Image (cartoon, coloured by chain):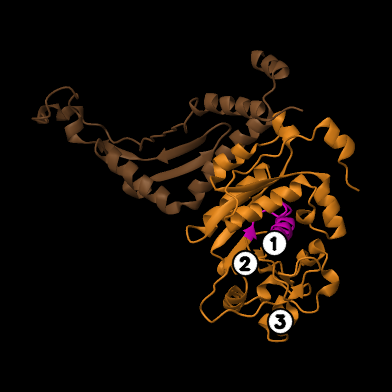
Chain colours: A orange, B brown
Amino acid sequence: MHELRVDPLPAAPPEGQRRGRCIVITSGKGGVGKTTTTANVGVALASTGARVVLIDADVGLRNLDIVLGLEARVRHHVLDVLDGNAELDDALVSDKRVATLKLLAASQTREKDDVDTAAFKDLVDRLRERFDYVMIDCPAGIEMGFQNAIVGADEAIIVCTPEVSAVRDADRVVGLLGDRVKTKLIVNRLRPSLVKRGKMLSVDDVNAILRLPLLGVIADEPGVIVSTNKGEPIALDPASSTGEAYRKIAGRIVGTDTSAPEIPREASFFDKLFGGQR
Amino acid sequence: MLDFLKRLFNPEPSNVTARERLRLVLLSDHLALAPDVVESLKADLIAVISKYVDVDDAHCDVTFEQQESVVAMLANIPILGMKPAVRTPRPAPPVDPAPASASVAAEPEAPETAAAEPEPPPAAPKPRRRRRRRANVNAAPAH
């Protein structure tokens, strides 16, 4: 376990001694929950005491800040840094809740093609010297924005929902990532009751096609929507089973949790009766 | 009619349909994305067929087509004529290609077309899938 660090921006360790892990969260298809996953896994990772920076690479469609509840704190964004209009330290937004978590927001008024791939990779490399984890929220699609987002990463998390379209796109992205990138899978928005009735692809069905190491499975449940409404990642909710699922994913990334991912089960009558969030 | 009744009373769960559609579409996607693989398959195919018949290499065409329930390989291989060695019936010892039988020469008519449609693993995986599905149902505790 990491010790919880409280300093706002940890001092850089000696040159060349540290190289944090760079993980890109990607999916091909849009709307499968990449940003929510990035926010929650990032928060959960940082809660272990690891130094984490989240980069929103979805230039033009900035969202990671609002999902994290940090939208009011953003002063500069990633292109300000790349263009030399802002210092990196000024652009890194500190999280309200977890001291070791930083956000580098995307630029809302720019386009994905404005990002210089080599400069973006340099930025990632600089961040890897200062953080344990650099997590990149990749835009949907497989065009320039995707290429930029994956250029500095040596690990990837594929977010896939149990839908034919998401699986097909994920399969394409896995092919594009190739062997260079260590790729793992999060199955998102699973509805256990539908799977049980044969109305939804199961985790096994999805992974029979993608054949990736499974990092975790997230249920499609109201709690995630509620937490996003509030800008409070559910991973921080100690009472939520989905929050626990995100924390376990973080544990598997760090390597402290070796348990096999649990498949969410159907909410019981009593869960429904007493467990509702507002 | 029987098929219709079967479907009416025992409809296939939509996740089975989804699985099958995905399997087909991905097979087709992968073939489309691997032109070099398709090229070498085509070359091998032509090489094998050339052992038996003279083939018009320049006009060979191998394509894949997604059909209703299979991805089919469509090989359009114009045949120019038989190979002399192949004209004798197989069982005889492979000595003496018997030039006498040359009169049975294949008249090179309009190029024939060989079409092959190998079904990708047909019935075999299905029972396994069903078993897996049932196992899932059992694994989910029903509270």
The chain containing the residue under callout 3 comes to A
Q: Are marks 3 and 1 on the same chain?
A: yes
**Badge 3 or badge 1: first in the primary sequence:** 1
A91 is within the stretch colored magenta: no
> Is residue B31 shown above or below A84?
above
Over which residues does the magenta segment extend? A25-47
User: Residue beneath label 3, please?
Assistant: A89
The one nearer the camera, A18 or B31, is A18
- Mark 1, Cα crowd under 10 Å, few <14 / some 14-19 / many 20+, is many
Sequence order check, earlier mark of 3 and 2: 3
Amino acid identity at mark 1: Gly
Kind of element beneath mark 2: strand
Badges 1 and 2, same chain:
yes
Residue B133: name its quadrant.
Answer: top right
Disc marking residue A42? 1
**Would you name the residue on which mark 2 appears?**
A133
Question: Is A220 rendered above or below residue B115?
Answer: below
Estimate the spatial distance between the alpha carbons at disc 3 and disc 1, rounded to whole Å: 19 Å
**Dominant secondary structure of the magenta stretch?**
helix
- Residue at the image point whose x is 72% and y is 49% from the top: A244
Label 2 crowding class (10 Å Cα cut-off): few <14, some 14-19, many 20+?
many
A239 lies left or right of B113: right
**Occupied quadrant, residue B116:** top left
Of the pair B62 and A252, the residue shown nearer to us: A252
For this orientation, the residue located farthest to the right is A278
* Frontmost residue, A229 versus A210: A229
Q: Secondary structure at mark 1?
A: helix
Residue A142 visible within the image: no
| Disc 1: host chain | A
